Amino acid sequence: MAGNERSEQSEFPVRGLHVGVGRKGDVARWEKFIGEALPQEGANLLVVEINYSYAYESYPQVAGDGALAAEDVKRLVTACRNAGVELVPQINALGHQSWTGRSSGLLRAFPDFDERPDIPQDAGKEVLYCRSYCPLHPEVHGVFFALMDELADACEARQLHVGMDEVFLIAEEKCPRCRGKDPAELFAGEVSALRDHLAEQGRTMWMWGDRFINAADYPTGLWEGSENDTWPAVDKVAKDIVICDWHYERAFETPEFFARKGFGVVASPWRKEDVALDELRIMQRLRQESDRALGVLQTTWCGFDSFVRAYYGELDPEGRRSRGPIEAAHCFKTLFAALRGE
C-alpha cells in the first residue's frame, strides 16, 4: 500500500469527538468541556452535528425550535480555538431529513424536495426510517449549498461533515426524477456535487462511509454497509474526501478498504469499549503502512448536554436515559487513554 512508514506509536493527526446539538443547550457548559476536558483527553477535533439547529439567515424557515444563534456558535468557535481544537460543523445531506415521517428543517420548508412526498408526515418507524431529499430536484442544491456555506462560515471551518449515512430512500420508483436510475450513480453524483462545491470554497468534505461498503463483502448488515446498491459509488468520486468509518457492534477491516481506495479514513466507534480498542488497533496497524489512516472520531449519539454530564459523572446511572450517554463517555475515556498510551 502507498504511504509513509510509521511506527505504531506515531500520533494520529485526527483525535476527534462527534457530538450532536438538537437545540440550544448549556453553552457555558460546552465551553468548559471544550476548554478543559478535550485538551486533557488529547482531543484535537470536535465535529458538532448542527443540521437545522442554527438560526440561518439565508433560509430562516429551515431552523428548528431552540436553534443556536450566531453568538452561540461564535462562543463555540472561540472555545475551540483557545483549546487548540478544530471545529468541524455537520449538516446532513441527502438522507436523515426526518425522523420517521415527520420532516425536519429542509423538507418542512421545501416539501417539493422530498424523494417520497407521498409518505405522510404521521408515518411511523414501521413505514419509514428517515426521509431523503431528491438529489435531482433542480432547486435543491441552490438552497442546500447556501446552508452549507453559511454554517461553515459561522464556524470559521476549513472542513465540513455532510453526513450521508443510512441513505435508504434513493432512486425511488415513486420519485418522478429518480425512478429507474442507478442508486450508485445517484449517490456518487450527490457526493461529487457536495464535494465540488466545498472544494470551490477551499474546504474539505467529511462523510460517513457506510453507503460505500458492499455488505456482501463485509458482514456489516444493512446499516453499517450497503445492501441497496449504492456501494459502487466508491469508485466514482474524488479521493480527497475524509471517510468516517463507523462500526458499533464489532470492528471490521474496512479502514484498510478505504485507504486502498485512496481516501483518508478515521475509525468511528460509539459505546462499546472493546470494539473501540479493536478499531484503534486496526488503525495503528494501518498507520504503519499508510498516512491515509488519519485517526479516530468517537461518536456519542445522545446530545451534547447529556454527554458532558455523563463525562463529569453527573448522570444517575439508574436513570432511564442515562445508559447511552454514560456508555459513550466511558468509551471515549477508554479510547483516548489508549491513544495516550495509558
Image (cartoon, rainbow, N blue to C red):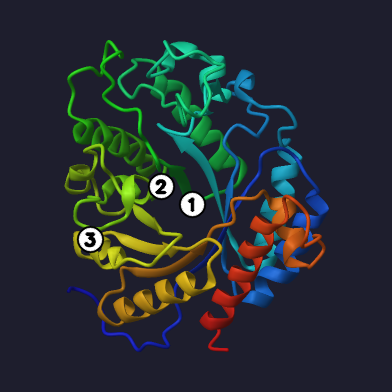
Element type at mark 1: loop
Q: What is the spatial separation of the Cα atoms under label 2 and label 3, in whole angstroms? A: 20 Å
Q: Amino acid at mark 2?
A: Gly
Residue 342, horizontal then vertical, whole percent? 58, 89
102 left or right of 325 in image: left
Q: Residues within 10 Å of mark 3 (few under 14, many from 20)?
A: some
Q: Residues within 10 Å of mark 2 (few under 14, many from 20)?
A: few
Q: Amino acid at mark 1?
A: Arg
In the rendered view, would you say 177 is above or below 194?
A: above
Q: Quadrant of the N terminus?
A: bottom left
Residue that numbered label 3 is attached to: 262
Asked which quadrant contains residue 229, the reply is: top left
Reading the chain from its start, which is encountered first: label 2 or label 1? Answer: 1
Residue that numbered label 1 is attached to: 158
Q: Residue at x 66, y 60 (%)?
A: 80
Residue that numbered label 2 is attached to: 202
Q: Circles 2 and 1: CB distance less than 8 Å? A: yes
Element type at mark 3: loop
Q: Residue at x 78, y 67 (%)?
A: 312
